[in-house]
Image: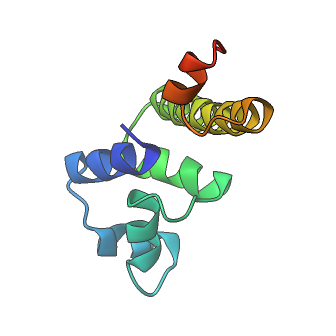
Amino acid sequence: MTVGEFLAHARLKANLSQWDVAKKLGYTSPQFVSNVERGISKPPIKVLKTLVEMYGIKPRDLIVTIEIQLAREMNARIREIREACLSVLTGARSPKERKWKNTF
């Protein structure tokens, strides 16, 4: 579950619409809330604090969700970099080609 999905779930559980949340945060449209929930933008820490209070969620649950998402993103990026490095170093374009060249 992404942070946005977590927040959307918590908002619905709190029986709030995106409009309700946007108004309480001082926005004139629900677009910011929608963008956060879809993962397009990341909210400032002060907004996260307000959302935790508004949704009645435990800060620890949000922090764990953030940590998991960051770990997934970092691991995906590490795999991309590793693949790019191996391709350059071995001249092979795919893991299958590298296997046949006796590389890892």
The percent coordinates of residue 91 (x first, y second) are 72, 36
Q: Residue at x 45, y 87 (%)?
A: 28
Q: Nearer the viewer, residue 9 or 76?
A: 76
Comparing 58 with 90, the one in front is 90
Identify the residue at image location x=53%, y=53%: 50
Q: Residue furthest bottom?
A: 28
Residue drawn at point x = 38 percent, y = 48 percent? 7
Residue extending farthest to the front is 101
Quadrant in which residue 77 is drawn: top right
* As drawn, 9 above or below 59: below
Q: Position of residue 27 (x, y in %)?
A: 49, 80
In the displayed structure, 76 sits above or below 20; it is above
50 to 29, vertically: above or below: above
- State which quarter of the image contains the C terminus: top right
**Taking 16 as reference, is 70 left or right?**
right
In the rendered image, residue 81, in percent from the top left (x then y), is placed at 71, 37
In this rendered view, identify the residue nearer to me: 68 or 27.
68
Quadrant in which the N terminus appears: top left
